Amino acid sequence: MNKPNSPTSPKHAERQTAFFAGARDTFPLIVGAIPFGIIFGAVAVSSGLSAGGAAAMSAVVFAGAAQFISLGLIAAGANLPIIVLTTLIVNLRHALYSATLAHHLKGLPQRWYLPLGFWLTDESFVVAARYFEHAPVGPAKRWYLLGSEIFMYANWQLMTWIGVRAGQTMPDLRNWGLDFALVVTFIGILVPEIKSRPTLAAVLVAGSTAMLANNLPNQSGLLLAAIVGIGTGVFLESRAAAASGILA
Amino acid sequence: MNEWLLISGMALATFATRYPVLVWLSRTSLPPSVFRALKFVPASVLSAIIFPAVFLPGGELALRLNNAPLFAGLIAVFIAWRSRNLLLTILLGMAALWTWRAIFPL
């Protein structure tokens, strides 16, 4: 009776469960993205972007940190190639995310990679990376990531629009410190992940490097800091493994 | 500057950091050593965003009482460590920011 793709088949139920699990697990991160999206919309219109431009940027770029930085550059009168290059550098961390997730997304039908890639953000990456460690083999992983991503995307569009409207009616909204929501969200993700000494060292070294390299152009200090942090973690972990004789 | 050209350029630049690596590495196998390194990606990237935001809010080191992001950040770290609850960390972290700014204005 049940065809593989009919709405009542067990396979369909598994996909649906994974999809909504992805959306549900992303909820706390959505809460953090709400004020960030609103402040983006509000600051966008006061930085010289049109209301339609702000909405379009959220729709086709969909990268909160890069969008935010571009507003600062637009307001500072930077030219187009500089802003595009900055966007590329700020978003290079997504290449690291893609590399991490790709291992779990091998052999999918080609049509999957386009949406999964386009919608990838910090938030969906963190949620999916955690889930993928213990996820069952099969379609659950891709549906979980898709659920997380679509939920993030829909929220970002809505919040940008609300922010644009709020910015037009409440000009002092940008002084509320709403952009700090992104920082506390990242703190809330990061702290419970620090379970080993190599990870703690990676955190401290990456953080310190980012501070020292804060004045490098185009936010390239972020990438430098990430690389130094990863190197620190790998070095300490392999040394600890060698000391305990685990590593052959 | 042409707004639509700018948005198109940013969209392409962002897409280029997401899609190609996903497709490429979903077809190729990486050596295990790469996975040991990738494990440290989230912690390193998040730290590189957090530290400057709380210690250098205006672009310069601000170890001052009226640096609300620093103290709200420290409070958020404590809440995250004790509760391991993301939602609670976000809500109390923002409350801490606004409270601190009210007590120690710039």
Image: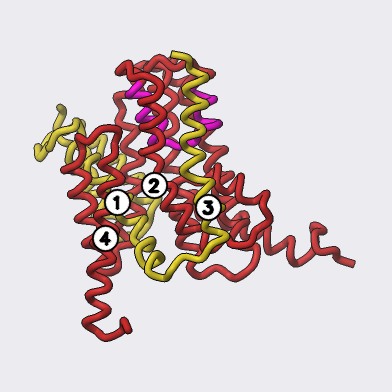
Chain colours: A red, B yellow
Instruction: Evaluate whether label 3 is on the same chain as label 1.
Output: no
Q: Looking at the picture, which amino acid does disc 4 mark?
A: Gly
Which residue is found at the position 51% from the left and 70% from the top?
A134
Report which residue position mark 4 lands on. A231
Quadrant containing the N terminus of chain A is: bottom right
Q: Chain of mark 4?
A: A
Which residue is found at the position 43% from the left and 69% from the top?
B31
**Residue B100 showing in the rendered view:** no
Report which residue position mark 3 lands on. B22
Q: Position of residue A137 (x, y in %)?
A: 61, 70
- Disc 1 to disc 2, C-alpha distance: 8 Å
Which disc number belongs to residue A226? 1
Going from the N terminus, do you reach mark 4 or mark 2 first? 2
Location of residue A188 with respect to A41 vertically, above or below? below
Q: Main secondary structure of the magenta part?
A: helix
Going from the N terminus, do you reach mark 1 or mark 2 first? 2
Instruction: Evaluate whether label 1 is on the same chain as label 2.
Output: yes
Label 3 secondary element: helix
- Disc 4 to disc 3, C-alpha distance: 22 Å
Location of residue B4 with respect to A61 vertically, above or below? above
Q: Position of residue A202 (x, y in %)?
A: 25, 59
Report which residue position mark 2 lands on. A93
Q: Position of residue A152 (x, y in %)?
A: 52, 43
